[in-house]
Amino acid sequence: MSLTKEDGRRIRADGAGKLEKEICEKHNLKQIGGSRTKIDGSDGVNNKSIKNARGSSTQVHLTTQNKFIEQMGLQCRDIDFIRQFCGDSSINNNGIDRYKISEIDKDNLDAFYSFLKNNKRKVVDYIIRNGFDITHVIYKDTKNDIEYELSYEEIMEKIEECAWVGKEGGIHLKNKKGKSYFHFQREGKRNPNNRYNVLWHIHKELFK
């Protein structure tokens, strides 16, 4: 059964409020949260980002194309890739307002892959921390009521063996067994105000 918009809003509200509060209380953390910080709970020493998910992955970072380009210091063909892949209202690709991976100019695609390969730690640091001192990430599988936790250092160690792999709808950071730890896609909502944003997901497989 597919979720309605109202279902999605309710799940996000629960994840950001009630469920985060429960985890903070369990870990003796002061709940912080809000849209201006990556830190959801802190004890003054440990600053934890909390992710609640019913599925195999959940949103970890969302930003505009322009901000992503600026903060990552993207250049020329990297920028062209982001513009083509995330799209905009001026694009008409056979009635579609963006391009799939296989439709993007090879030079632009290769340039972005090179950026990701050469800046793997920088990209993962950005989507987890975005300038905030996150020391741990908690991933709560709400469907099965299982909680996972990794330190920032453990995450950075685990990604060392990983490589970026492209699919039509996004690019995944996968381990040697082909399991995704993170992936990048466009936001893709119907509203044009948030249809073309850059969206990163974190996967449960990272914590196993």
Image (spheres, grey):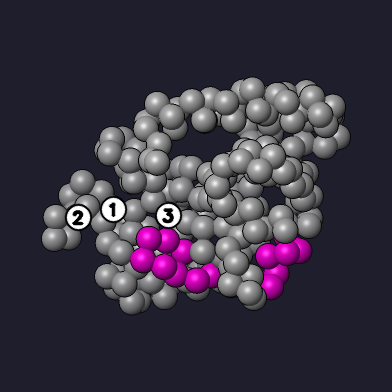
Residue 187's place in the image compared with 33, above or below, is: below
The residue closer to the viewer here, 193 or 13, is 13
In the image, what residue occupies the spot 44% across and 70% down? Answer: 166
Q: Amino acid at mark 2?
A: Ile
Q: Which residue is mark 3?
A: 185
Mark 2 burial class by Cα count in 10 Å: few <14, some 14-19, many 20+ = few
- Mark 1 lies on residue: 87
Residue extending farthest front? 1
* Residue 163 included in the magenta stretch of the image: yes
Which residues lie in the magenta part?
156-171
Q: Amino acid at mark 3?
A: Gln
Q: Secondary structure at mark 3?
A: strand
Q: Report helix, strand or loop for mark 1.
A: loop
Question: Which residue is at 41% across, 64% downward?
Answer: 78
Q: Amino acid at mark 1?
A: Gly
Q: Please give the residue where the numbered disc 2 appears in the rendered image.
A: 96
